[in-house]
């Protein structure tokens, strides 16, 4: 699905899937972040320059992470994973294509009960179809998986 628009009519410069990682402060809740086990990045020169400029001036908080929304502390929040999640979710939301996380970057984890996204907290138990991010990838058959994420093994 196309990532929607946030004031940008630029072409796609990133293709990725999401992964759900536990928050360090609330392990029962998970943050929805870019899964770097399946990530294709080919920005135009202008988009690359915007990436670099954003990295130089992007707000970062030790408690909220990158950007104004802030997903909080999760494994990888201070690294490229945290910055790219911020950039492609808040700065240039329309410049991405989000792949199905159960097919591309599948970690075989069940859907989280609480999920932190750029739209706030999603309760996957009461609205399992919320933004297609509450999928239970542990029920995906091997034939449906194109890229497996073995980083948890």
Image: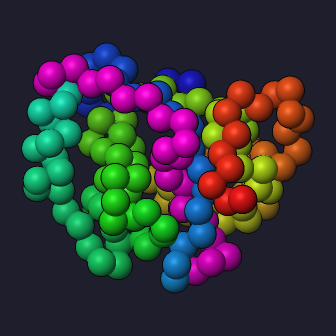
Q: Is residue 104 visible?
A: yes
Coloring basis for residues: rainbow
Q: Is residue 130 left or right of residue 48?
A: right
Position of residue 55 measured from the top left corner of the image (x, y, whole percent): 17, 51
Q: Is residue 55 magenta?
A: no
Q: Is residue 149 left or right of residue 126?
A: left
Q: State whether the magenta stretch is mostly helix, strand or loop.
A: strand
Q: Is residue 134 visible?
A: no
Seen from the viewer's position, the closer of residues 29 and 16 is: 16
| Vertical position of residue 143 compared to residue 62: above or below | above
Q: Is residue 42 magenta?
A: yes
| Vertical position of residue 104 compared to residue 1: above or below | below
Q: Please identify the quarter of the rendering in which residue 99 is found.
A: top right
Q: Residue at x 77, y 32 (%)?
A: 145
Specify the segment rendered in magenta: 26-46
Quarter of the picture containing the C terminus is bottom right
Position of residue 51 measured from the top left corner of the image (x, y, whole percent): 20, 39
Quarter of the picture containing the N terminus is top right
Q: Residue at x 78, y 45 (%)?
A: 137
Q: How many marks?
A: 0
Q: Residue at x 49, y 60 (%)?
A: 120
Position of residue 63 measured from the top left corner of the image (x, y, whole percent): 35, 78
Position of residue 134 measured from the top left corner of the image (x, y, whole percent): 71, 49
| Vertical position of residue 90 compared to residue 121: above or below | above
Q: Residue at x 32, y 23 (%)?
A: 42
Q: Please identify the quarter of the rendering in which residue 113 is found.
A: bottom right
Seen from the viewer's position, the closer of residues 7 and 62 is: 62
Q: Is residue 20 left or right of residue 76?
A: right
Q: Please identify the quarter of the rendering in which residue 64 is found.
A: bottom left
């Amino acid at each position: 699905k196309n990532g929607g628009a946030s004031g940008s009519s630029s072409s796609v410069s990133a293709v990725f899937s999401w992964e759900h990682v536990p928050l360090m402060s609330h392990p029962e809740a998970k943050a929805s972040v870019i899964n770097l086990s399946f990530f294709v990045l080919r920005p135009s020169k202008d988009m690359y320059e915007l990436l670099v400029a954003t990295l130089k001036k992007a707000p970062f908080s030790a408690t909220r992470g990158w950007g104004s929304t802030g997903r909080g502390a999760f494994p990888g929040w201070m690294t490229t994973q945290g910055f790219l999640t911020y950039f492609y979710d808040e700065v240039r939301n329309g410049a991405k294509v989000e792949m199905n996380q159960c097919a591309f970057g599948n970690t075989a984890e069940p859907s989280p009960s609480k999920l932190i996204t750029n739209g706030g907290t999603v309760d996957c138990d009461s609205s399992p179809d919320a933004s297609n991010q509450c999928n239970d990838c542990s029920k995906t058959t091997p034939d449906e998986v194109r890229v497996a994420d073995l980083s948890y093994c």
